[in-house]
Image: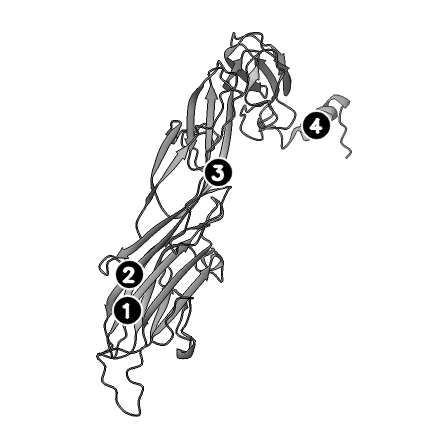
Amino acid sequence: MKLHFSPLLLASMMILTSLSGCIFEDEEPSSNGEVLAVFNYSPSENIRVGDTISFDASSSTPNDGRLTYRWDFDNDSSVDKTGMTAEWSYDSPGTKTIVLTISDGSITSEQIRELTIAVATAVEPIAEITQYADSEDCEDNDIDEERYIVLWMCHYDKSQTDRDVSETTTVSLDASNSVAGNPDEYISEYNWDLDLNDDADNDGDSENDADLTGESITWNDVEPGEYKIKLNIQNSQDMVDSDTIKVYVSYAAKWSDFEMGGNTSGNGVELDFDVTISYDRDTGNTIRKAVAELTYPQQDGDCTNIPGTNNCRAKLDIYAYNEDDDEAANTSNIGLDQRNNGDDCDEENNDCVFLTMSSYIFGDGDTTYGDGDWTFKIKNDKQNDLQVESFIIRLVYV
């Protein structure tokens, strides 16, 4: 028997078939991402009355062509411009509030920002950080530096009971050579940002924090390291400028005339010296090299020589361990006839052993050992005790 369908019934069946699989979807198109208003403007500073300012909301999301953009440039709840980008200028100085409102048709988002407009005749200031350097390093070598602030911490009277490298120093920072602009203007703000990777005030700009303020200030508790700092100034016409400089703080410590015990129990005697080393490419705080220098007498004066032996010949070595206690380097393979490092080594009576580690070894890689807390060890595997002449640790950042 043949089945017969009326044209109306057949059309209804076709419509129902075409809707299958879609009846659970919302009538309104769903958003593919968070609706978030974000805008920037250029120039971002030193804007005068009459200057054209370009506003750009292309960083708003979702950026798929469905958003509408409304700009309110005087915070009066009226729409001054539409579109992803817009231009505007102001005819009076002062702090201006800009409101961007975006919508995808169902969800809206807004961002509010403020900018400062200076008078048309305002002149930009000139920020300048005074550069200086120590005249000599800890070995009395001349320092010839005209670009950076270079300082050495020299602690050459460390006691044997104080084997930690934990000293800090103060850094003087001076901006007195900065210029306000016009003769009748003055600099109203001196803000020093001491960490350009940390946004301390959470304003989205990591290089405008006021970690210290003032024309001439003292930066306390500075550890050995490499630092990039920034000076931000503002004059009486709300115009701004900035200057940056690198600060290098290197370190040297010396322990003199101390006793190293002998190996009388089958276990070598060790003395530990603890240091902190920085190697961070992200912040730019990267050590150049770490050096340990050991000078000791070749023979113990109290040793009784046994004929036919070399029992009184001393041999001390330096070992370096990272914070995971992995051994990174040592001097044990340096022969007794090669222990004469340094220009001032008394080769007739002393051994002079240097352990130098370049910056590479402190990197964060499969074949490197990382930075952080390190330990230099002096080891004595000989039976005789010994009066060590000196041990020096240098952390060179410049």
Residue 157: in sight, yes or no?
yes
Mark 2 is on which residue type?
Trp
Mark 3 is on which residue type?
Ile
Instruction: Check whether the beta carbons of the residues at disc 3 and disc 1 lie within 8 A of each other.
Output: no
Q: Earlier in the sequence, mark 3 or mark 4?
A: 4
Measured as percent of width and height from the top left, residue 166 is found at 30, 51
Residue 164: in sight, yes or no?
no
Gap in angstroms between the C-alphas marked 2 and 3: 33 Å
Q: Earlier in the sequence, mark 2 or mark 3?
A: 3
Instruction: Check whether the beta carbons of the residues at disc 3 and disc 4 lie within 8 A of each other.
Output: no
Foreground disc of the pair 1, 4: 1
Gap in angstroms between the C-alphas marked 3 and 1: 41 Å
Can you say whether 26 is above or below 322 in the image?
above
Q: Earlier in the sequence, mark 1 or mark 2?
A: 2
Q: Which residue is mark 1?
A: 388
Residue 255 numbered mark, or none: 2
